[in-house]
Amino acid sequence: MNNSSNNPHLVVVFAIAGIAFGYGESSLAYDLDEELLAMDNEFEIGNGESKVIADHKTPEPYRVCVKKGQDSVPVKARYDGHELIIDLGSCSDLVAKRIVLSPAGKLKDDAVLLGKYQHVKS
């Protein structure tokens, strides 16, 4: 008689499946806070403001991360004739000569957009 509850191989399979499907999520999950801590350059942008973070003669790689905030809105990145919306709590990689960041919508009265960016050098 083969009882699956006594099968040690089945226990190992379930343990591996549990890790793969998120039961060990805290150790495997992407951590934006850790990435933000590793970045050198910060931005703080209010209503009607913009910030140039790159201005080169040839395209250069950058990573832009936006912090989550209760009173905040996503960031609009304008670069080399393109536009990209970067959501709160996320990052985007851009390769461009010139990158300008601004709010993608109206911020509440004294709120500012906060984030960091990094020139990714190979």
Image (tube, rainbow, N blue to C red):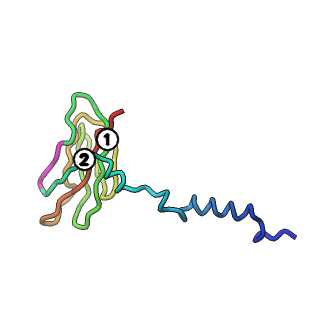
On the image, numbered disc 1 is attached to which residue?
Answer: 94
Give the x, y percent position of residue 67. Answer: 28, 57
Q: Does residue 49 belong to the magenta stretch? A: yes
Q: Earlier in the sequence, mark 2 or mark 1?
A: 2
Q: Residue at x 43, y 55 (%)?
A: 30
- The rendered magenta stretch, by its main secondary structure, is classed as loop
Q: Residue at x 81, y 71 (%)?
A: 3
- Answer whether labels 2 and 1 touch (C-beta < 8 Å): yes
Decide: is 121 above or below 73: above
Per the image, the residue denoted by label 2 is 77
Q: Label 2: few (<14), some or many (≥20) within 10 Å?
A: many
Give the SS element for disc 1.
strand
For badge 2, the amino acid type reads Ala
Q: CA distance from mark 2 to mark 1?
A: 9 Å
Residue 61: image location, x then y, percent? 31, 37
Task: Give the vertical position of 112 relative to 56 (above or below).
Answer: below
Callout 2: SS: strand
Q: Which residues are magenta?
A: 48-52
Q: For residue 53: magenta? A: no
